[in-house]
Amino acid sequence: MLNVHIMQCGDVPGTLPSYATQGSAGMDITAALMEPLNLEPGAIALIPTGIAIALPQGYECQVRSRSGLAAKHGVFALNAPGTIDSDYRGEIKVILANSGKQAYSIQPGERIAQLVIAKYETVIWEHVSELSTTERGSGGFGSTGTL
């Protein structure tokens, strides 16, 4: 288990992200709104969560869509997965987009996205004149077939 510092911030204090089930990889995060926010079809909004975190170096926090919100209403985290870097200390905000045909009302305290904490590696680029060969080579965009 990883201990992560978290604090409430913003105009409306947020709630702690939480796992819905024991096997959940993502923690639900909620909207820190004073009143409902209407998200019209085609609209994009930056939704505050009222929390800030301090991740250890070597970790990121990924912001992902909630599948039910996307499937039922066409509302999703636009840049999912979005990355919260280990050195960011500001309020977490979620970019929500409505690709549905009807307006969607985001309620105060509503679960709007998921957070997944992931370990990552930093790299040092090594410039070479050619790359090792593979069976696939430079084939992409459907080159391995459709079935």
Image: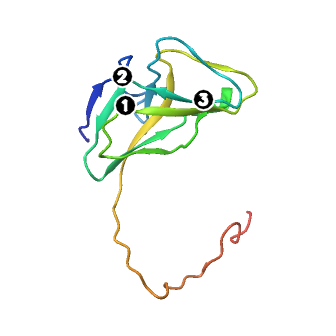
At x 34% / y 34%, what residue is drawn?
Answer: 90
The residue closer to the viewer here, 140 or 98, is 98
The secondary structure type at the circle numbered 3 is helix
Q: Nearer the viewer, mark 3 or mark 1?
A: 1
| Residue 105 spot, x, y in % from top left | 61, 17
| Residue 119 spot, x, y in % from top left | 34, 52
Report the residue marked by disc 2: 10
| Residue 54 spot, x, y in % from top left | 27, 39
Quadrant containing the N terminus is top left
| Residue 130 spot, x, y in % from top left | 49, 87
Q: Are marks 2 and 1 in contact (CB under 8 Å)?
A: yes
The residues tagged by marks 2 and 1 sit, at their Cα atoms, a distance apart of 7 Å
Report the residue marked by disc 1: 91
Q: Are marks 2 and 3 in contact (CB under 8 Å)?
A: no
Q: Nearer the viewer, mark 2 or mark 3?
A: 2
At x 49% / y 84%, what residue is drawn?
Answer: 131
Amino acid tagged 2: Gly
Give the label on residue 38, or none: none
Amino acid tagged 1: Glu
Report the residue marked by disc 3: 68
Color scheme of the displayed model: rainbow
Q: Are marks 3 and 1 in contact (CB under 8 Å)?
A: no
Binning the other alpha carbons within 10 Å of mark 1 as few (below 14), some (14 to 19) or many (20 upward) gives: some
